[in-house]
Image: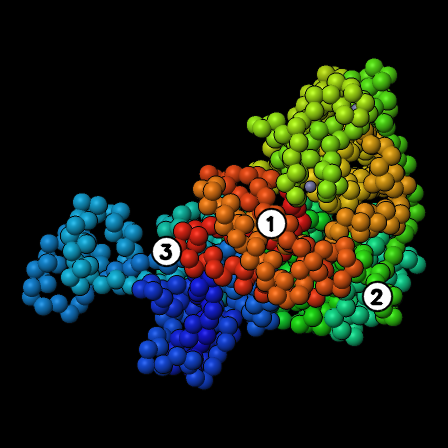
């Protein structure tokens, strides 16, 4: 038998399966998806079996054999192997990179070198061996294999002798793959098997060894196994005394495998399904039908904040489990709060595994093993939970599907939404995309269906489940505030609102949306912002050159001293921080209790949870933060939500800035007045007339989409086309510049040969444009200059194939090969 193995070397030349012979002892064990150690270039490397075959594609006499099988149960399933291949094609990454993304970090094995003493030595070599210290020889004969690393550490002064011994073959060297983390074993004490005999022994216990007697009495009473550590903590005594009792055959001491369960110490109150509202019921029926039929379907659940999407998810999952299938729920990392976990654990108890990045590697590995060993039927987690190794998936739910965190920013640069759809196709599973503000891509795809004569996949839930109205939103024109002499960052309305909340003992959420690295230019008198004349996005201020630049097309101009629109001198380069807001709050409202939540205050493990818990316990009046505070929070005493400057996200140089702003305003507004107390929202902005602000004020998603689609159509952005971002980097600017020009030229040539090169605006069904190369927004990183090309295309074009062909000359040639290419398909951010 031959195993085709993808070896873990992420380079384009080795990105194909290699053939290995399967030793007969392993043949019953190895399957597609098995993790193996194989000899490769003089080392043993980790790899995955992607295919089994009867015959090799190369000369079988030159075939090497699989060296190790790393797990008894293959960590990957055949469908995931296929999915990884699909990812490598779609996202232009190597197959191994995609495979690595699917397994927990604990299984990313590392090669370890071992040495052992050669036991068939001739006289001459015996001589050599005798030069080694006795202690070292003892160590080698005691252990069958010794880590080379530990020899080096313990006998530093013998380095030359060890080296010589290795060279001469006195010491033999092997490599083996070791997991970074082992299954945790716990030494556990078991109560006596023969209770009667133990009781007798207890009664007749000699007066000496009182501690042993106490231990035995404790275990007899307990009647259940207990971890040794816990026993000693509860009953006292030493490990030796436990061993002594065990030696008498009265207790048993054994290592058992332990699951690290991050939620072990928590009790989850069991909840029962709520009677659904009419709106929930009709949506539920559609989803349940899709699950029952087992047809891969993508459904878009558009439900306003508080419409009760989670209850629909829970009941749909219950239906799925009844069908004997499994379910995956994806939640943005930041929204995977204890509140959220509680809702799922509360309904499904131990049938749920939780996967998120705040778990330790060990905890995550154990949660993952619960899935692989069929102990759970539901997996809830961030992006990568889509790779949960379930065998029969019936339902995939993506909550807050518009969130950009579903796109992975490092290789493989996949989007969990697209991967879900592909995986669901293999399983015949339904995909439910849920959001109060669906992404334009998803919304456009769902609304196209009726036009194509198919059943609509759009499932609306326009009403809040508890009948509470959506909160009123007041938009404050900050230009008018300045004109009226208010130079503070708080408008009079927001200031007053805060005073009232403090008086009434209610809570406030303040959002300061700051992201990205760039600053933009804005006039504080008239709200003017500098836009690119070709791209309709804001220009970015570059401090060094004092130029305003466009990150899409490279347009550059002088930074103005006065506002080009109203000639005011109040033109500013914007970018303000949460810390400044905190200081201002303390100054204006002495004694105010503020919890600040941003990247600085949430680096520690569980910091995010702790801060939220404190706010939930009403230990603070204000929760101040970046977009982290906008997501999924549900606090009954929050009656005021303030957005300090809606413009910070509106003016980012990205074609999605209006969409992001609308989403953020809608999400954050949804945090107010969710329970008994009515809420209100205050949005401060310099662009009160912008449609993202006016439509968010009216909670009018449909109107926003109409406006936004018009803009996207005119400017040629998704969903009217698709984008690929190619970033190139090199230490030498001149070389980078010429290689990137050549690459873009080659790409245009190839597209022209395919007959697809042409402007998107010309109304052709298939068209592709290559913009650039231009300097990347972050034009130098780690001493490497960066250039980028943006590819825009429409219609059925195999862009990955074009890219591979265009890249080919640059991965082989000599100096050019040093230019690094990074490809981002469907980029979320072009910043
Ligand atoms: P969303 O996720 O759509 O913003 P949630 O799922 O958080 O909304 O639901 C909002 C509130 O409504 C929650 O407190 C939830 O318990 C409650 N709720 C949802 N569905 C029902 C129902 N059918 N009956 C009663 N309360 C419900
Ligand atoms: Zn102005
Ligand atoms: Zn431009």
The tag earlier along the polypeptide, 1 or 2, is 2
Colour treatment of the image: rainbow
The tag earlier along the polypeptide, 1 or 3, is 3
For ligand 3, tell me if the residue under mark 1 lies within 8 Å: no
Q: Nearer the viewer, mark 1 or mark 2?
A: 1
Residue at label 3?
Answer: 244
Q: CA distance from mark 1 to mark 2?
A: 33 Å
| Quarter residue 775 falls in | top right
126, 727: nearer the viewer = 727
55, 818: nearer the viewer = 818
Q: At x 69% / y 70%, what residue is drawn?
A: 425
24 with respect to 777 (left or right) = left
Q: CA distance from mark 1 to mark 3?
A: 73 Å
Mark 3 burial class by Cα count in 10 Å: few <14, some 14-19, many 20+: some
177 with respect to 690 (left or right) = left
Point out which mark residue 449 bears: 2
Q: At x 55% / y 58%, what residue is drawn?
A: 746
Q: Secondary structure at mark 1?
A: strand
Query: Eyeballing the image, is 553 above or below 247?
Result: above
Mark 2 burial class by Cα count in 10 Å: few <14, some 14-19, many 20+: some
693 with respect to 796 (left or right) = right
Residue 138 position, x and y percent, is 19, 57
Q: CA distance from mark 3 to mark 2?
A: 74 Å
Residue at label 1?
Answer: 789
């Amino acid at each position: 038998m031959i195993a085709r193995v993808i070896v873990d070397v992420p380079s384009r030349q080795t990105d194909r399966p290699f053939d290995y012979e399967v030793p007969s002892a392993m043949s019953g064990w190895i399957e597609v998806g098995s993790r193996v150690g194989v000899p490769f270039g003089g080392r043993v490397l980790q790899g995955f079996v992607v295919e089994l075959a009867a015959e090799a594609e190369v000369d079988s006499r030159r075939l090497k054999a699989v060296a190790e099988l790393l797990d008894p149960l293959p960590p990957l399933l055949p469908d995931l192997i296929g999915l990884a291949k699909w990812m490598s094609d779609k996202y232009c990454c190597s197959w191994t990179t995609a495979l690595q993304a699917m397994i927990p970090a604990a299984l990313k094995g590392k090669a370890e070198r071992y040495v052992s003493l050669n036991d068939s030595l001739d006289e001459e070599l015996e001589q050599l061996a005798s030069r080694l210290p006795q202690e070292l020889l003892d160590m080698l004969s005691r252990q069958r294999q010794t880590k080379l690393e530990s020899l080096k550490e313990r006998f530093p002064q013998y380095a030359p002798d060890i080296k010589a011994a290795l060279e001469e073959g006195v010491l033999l060297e092997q490599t083996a793959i070791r997991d970074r983390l082992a299954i945790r074993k716990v030494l556990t004490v078991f109560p006596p098997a023969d209770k009667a005999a133990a009781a007798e022994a207890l009664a007749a216990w000699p007066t000496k060894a009182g501690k042993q007697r106490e231990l035995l009495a404790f275990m007899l009473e307990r009647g259940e196994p207990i971890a040794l550590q816990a026993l000693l903590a509860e009953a006292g005594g030493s490990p030796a005394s436990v061993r002594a009792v065990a030696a008498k055959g009265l207790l048993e001491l054994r290592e058992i495998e332990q699951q690290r369960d991050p939620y072990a110490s928590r009790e989850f109150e069991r909840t029962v399904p709520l009677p659904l509202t009419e709106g929930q019921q009709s949506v539920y029926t559609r989803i349940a039908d899709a699950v029952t039929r087992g047809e891969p379907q993508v459904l878009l659940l558009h439900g306003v904040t508080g419409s009760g999407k989670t209850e629909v998810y829970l009941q749909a999952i219950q239906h799925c489990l009844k069908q004997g299938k499994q379910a995956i729920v994806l939640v943005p990392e930041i929204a995977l709060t204890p509140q959220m976990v509680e809702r799922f654990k509360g309904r499904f108890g131990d049938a749920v595994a939780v996967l998120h990045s705040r778990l330790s590697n060990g905890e995550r590995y154990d949660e993952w093993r619960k899935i692989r060993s069929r102990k759970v039927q539901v997996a809830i987690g961030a992006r990568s939970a889509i790779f949960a190794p379930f065998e029969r998936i019936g339902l995939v739910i993506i909550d807050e599907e518009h969130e950009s965190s579903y796109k992975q920013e490092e290789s493989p640069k996949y989007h969990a939404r697209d991967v879900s759809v592909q995986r669901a196709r293999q399983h015949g599973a339904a995909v439910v995309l849920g959001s109060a503000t669906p992404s334009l891509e998803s919304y456009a795809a769902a609304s196209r269906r009726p036009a194509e004569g198919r059943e609509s996949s759009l499932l609306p839930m326009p009403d809040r489940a508890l009948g509470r109205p959506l909160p009123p939103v007041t938009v404050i024109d900050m230009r008018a505030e300045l004109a009226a002499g208010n130079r503070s960052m708080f408008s009079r309305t927001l200031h007053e609102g805060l005073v009232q909340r403090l008086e009434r003992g209610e809570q406030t959420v303040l959002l300061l949306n700051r992201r990205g690295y760039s600053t933009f230019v804005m006039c504080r008198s008239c709200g003017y912002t500098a836009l690119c004349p070709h791209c309709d996005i804001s220009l970015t201020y570059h401090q060094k050159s004092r130029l305003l630049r466009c990150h899409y097309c490279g347009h550059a101009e002088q930074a103005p001293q006065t506002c080009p629109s109203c000639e005011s001198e109040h033109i500013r380069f914007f970018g303000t921080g949460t810390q400044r807001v905190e200081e201002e709050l303390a100054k204006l409202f002495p004694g105010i209790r503020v919890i600040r939540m941003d990247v600085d205050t949430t680096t520690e493990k569980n910091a995010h949870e702790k801060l939220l818990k404190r706010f939930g316990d009403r230990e603070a009046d204000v929760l101040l933060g970046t977009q982290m505070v906008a997501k999924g929070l549900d606090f009954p005493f929050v009656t005021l939500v303030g957005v300090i400057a809606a413009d910070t996200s509106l003016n980012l140089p990205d074609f999605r800035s209006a969409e992001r702003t609308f989403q953020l305003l809608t999400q954050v507004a949804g945090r107010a007045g969710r329970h008994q107390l009515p809420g209100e929202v205050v949005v401060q902005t310099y662009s009160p007339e912008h449609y993202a602000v006016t439509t968010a004020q009216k909670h009018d998603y449909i109107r926003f989409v109409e406006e936004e689609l018009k803009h996207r159509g005119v400017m040629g952005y998704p969903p009217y086309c698709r984008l690929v971002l190619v970033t190139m980097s090199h230490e030498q600017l001149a070389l980078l510049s010429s290689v990137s020009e050549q690459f873009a030229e080659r790409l245009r040539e190839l597209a022209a040969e395919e007959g697809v090169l042409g402007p998107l605006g010309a109304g052709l069904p298939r068209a592709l444009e290559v913009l650039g190369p231009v300097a990347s927004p972050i034009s130098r990183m780690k001493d490497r200059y960066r250039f980028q090309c943006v590819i825009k295309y429409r219609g059925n074009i195999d862009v990955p194939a074009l890219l591979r062909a265009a890249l080919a000359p640059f991965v082989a040639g000599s100096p050019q090969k040093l230019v690094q290419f990074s490809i981002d398909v469907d980029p979320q951010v072009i910043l």
